Image (tube, rainbow, N blue to C red):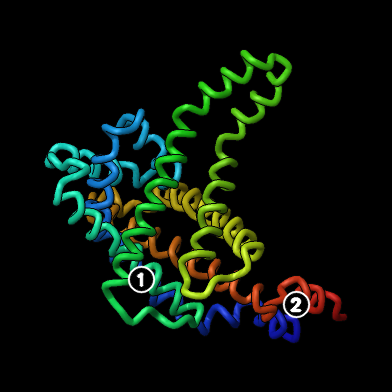
Amino acid sequence: MARIRSLRRLWEPFTACRASLYASSSSFYILLSVFPAALFLLSLLPYLPLSLDALLDALEQVVPNPFHPVVGYVFDTVRTSSTITLLSVSAVTTLWSASKGILAITDGLNAVLNRPREPRYLLRRLFSVLYFLILAVALLTMLLLHVFGESLLAACIRWFPAAVRVAALIYYLRTPYLFFLFGLLFALIFYFFPRRSLGFRWCLVSGLATSGCWLLISWAFSIYVNHFAGYVKLYGGIGLLLLTCIWLHICLLLFLYGALTASLLHNGAYHPISILRETFSRR
């Protein structure tokens, strides 16, 4: 019992921050922003050496397998019903709508980290638009690396024949690079999104941990839906939508926990290794 009480100190900071509440609201607004965000990304495709199939293939590596039809449905619906151009007024309106999910995440981060929220709503919305653009650029950069990765490796082998083994190793480690890319992306969000910045070292540690948990949860959801969630076949699209909401909620909860971990480590208020050492050194 003494060890259990000692181990409780590991998760006490996370139970008091009400992260689940903010994860629920953020997931709701992100779902509302899915179609505008997809519309904006599709409006960028004519200006980039990317195809819709390449975009879907890269996104489906992050989303659990059972949710791939949802991703395909969103982009197919937007593609067949949209004539938006990048420089039109409709594009600006779409960008404004898509940034609502980013605004919800930013407000959730500030609330979990006990940061004062920007009182001017218009300024918060403008910053959320800017953050959405940065995330869109980061996502498209990752897609370009994914699409042209094999071509770059082939060029490296042609120029440097001695690097064949290294290139082969990089090719077979395509999945781990998602772990590091998303870890870096989360670290940058933890560093820039809150009103008061944290130490980047702690943001990077928490970002990598969050990325690993995110990919692990996505893999676990794929196994669960494929083998145990029989009601998805019974209820069809509605059951799949509910599972999408649950998956998104868990991912955002892990994301907020990662930000809180970075804050606690930055302030020196969280020492998990010391707690574990103290707990298991007792007799």
* Residue beneath the point at 23% across and 51% down: 35
In the image: residue 127, left or right of residue 158: left
**Which of the two residues, 253 or 95, is positioned nearer the viewer here?**
95
Q: Position of residue 34 (x, y in %)?
A: 27, 54
**Which of the two residues, 68 or 197, is positioned nearer the viewer here?**
197
Q: Are marks 1 and 2 in contact (CB under 8 Å)?
A: no
**Is 104 situated above or below 138?**
below
Q: How many marks?
A: 2
Give SS at disc 1.
helix
Give SS at disc 2.
helix
**Is the residue marked by circle 1 packed among few (<14), some (14-19), or many (20+) residues within 10 Å?**
many
List the residue tagged with mark 1.
Answer: 24
* Residue beneath the point at 49% across and 69% down: 256
Residue 66 appearing in the image: yes
**Quadrant of the rendered image containing residue 268:** bottom right
Q: Position of residue 118 (x, y in %)?
A: 37, 78
3D distance between C-alphas at marks 1 and 2: 30 Å
In which quadrant will I find the C terminus? bottom right
**Which of the two residues, 44 or 68, is positioned nearer the viewer here?**
44
* Residue beneath the point at 27% across and 51% down: 37
Type of the residue with mark 2: Ile
Type of the residue with mark 1: Ser
* Residue beneath the point at 66% across and 73% down: 265
**Which of the two residues, 127 or 268, is positioned nearer the viewer here?**
127
Q: Position of residue 230 (x, y in %)?
A: 34, 51
**Is the residue marked by circle 2 packed among few (<14), some (14-19), or many (20+) residues within 10 Å?**
some
Residue 235 appearing in the image: no
Residue 202: numbered disc: none
Q: Position of residue 212 (x, y in %)?
A: 58, 53
List the residue tagged with mark 2.
Answer: 275
**Is 7 situated above or below 164?**
below
Of labels 1 and 2, earlier in sequence is 1
